[in-house]
Amino acid sequence: MPSDTIVTLIQKARDGDANAQCDLAKRYVTGDGVEKNETVAVALYTLAAEQGLAEAQYHLGVMLAYGRGVDKNEKQAVILFRLAADQGNAEAQYHLGIFLANGCGVDKNEAEAVSLYRLAAVQGHASAQYNLAFMLANGLGEAKNEKAAVELYRLAAAQGHVEAQFNLGWMLANGLGVDKDEEAAAVQFHLAATQGHKKAQLFFEVMPAHCRAIAKGEVEEQVVVEVIEEQPTEQVEKNIPSPSLKNISMMVLGGFIAAAGIAAVAIAFTVLNAATFGIAGIVVASAGVALALSGMGLFAAGAYKNRQPICEKSLDFPENMVPQ
């Protein structure tokens, strides 16, 4: 039988609580307290997304973007990312920026990508800070601005972003957008190297000996300070969503919600009802869910298909400024 926590969550989800539906969907994605089933997760995310919950819209966009529990649909993913991004969801802003920068599911638009990265960056999203820095350092989407790129790399590097540490080291070592400072560069290369960054390891080894010595001492000191202070910082990346979207926003959901809405409700509630009867009930219900969705041609029947990411590039722009 499900735990008391799961039973309570299921009841709230059945009562139409969007946050509960979203939380329960996450559990079906990870298999936390329930049998893992990404098809069911998609149905639950859909219910919450229809109520305007930005977090659910973002997660549903991810499922669609990567074909997890549903047939891959980059265009619908972009629509959902945009709905969540408009509500201030940093993850959605970041992912929408990636899709725009790479032309995935939407016409390529580097200028808009920069704007979205900036929105997420000011909320403390490290990867958005890194991507924005990369765009500015290379003049993508707007005029080249190495000075601004350095400051953004600093912000992301301070959060432990390994590529930001490496690129910041490169800019410091070469005086790009900042006064040349080999000692500071060595510190950044060493920080990235300790995270396994291969190029950072190579670059660190060719730095002057005194720079390497200083870097090792400073890195060790930083680690000690972090342990003593025990003040890890976490950036808040969620906004409280409005209880519902405007009618026009709901229309934008278009084909996916319109076609899947009724089915999603039936599917989710079938599973929620079955969940009260234990794992066996969930398995039986899930089989019916997969069959029903497969018949509609909206979702991938059966278990999660391990598909490759939509974009050939890493979502985090691994290509740095150092010649290959």
Image: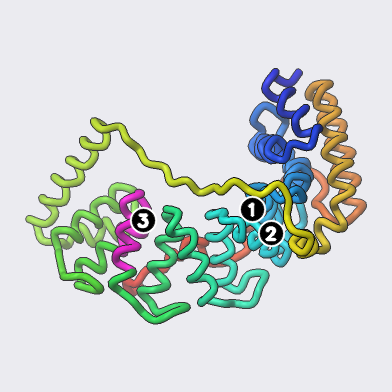
What residue is drawn where x is 85% and y is 26%?
Answer: 281
- Disc 3 secondary structure class: helix
- Numbered mark located on residue 58 in the image: 1
Q: Which residue is mark 2?
A: 80
Q: How many marks?
A: 3
How far apart are the alpha carbons under marks 1 and 3? 22 Å
Snapshot quadrant of residue 122: bottom left
Q: Earlier in the sequence, mark 1 or mark 2?
A: 1
Amino acid type, mark 1: Tyr
Q: Which residue is mark 3?
A: 156
Magenta segment, principal secondary structure? helix
Give the extent of the magenta segment.
149-167
Q: Residue, x 25% and y 57% (percent of image)?
A: 189
Residue contact at pointers 3 and 2, CB within 8 angstroms: no
Q: Is residue 133 magenta?
A: no
Q: Position of residue 308 (x, y in %)?
A: 63, 58
* Three-letter code for the amino acid on which mark 2 is drawn: Leu
Can you tell which mark lies on residue 5?
A: none
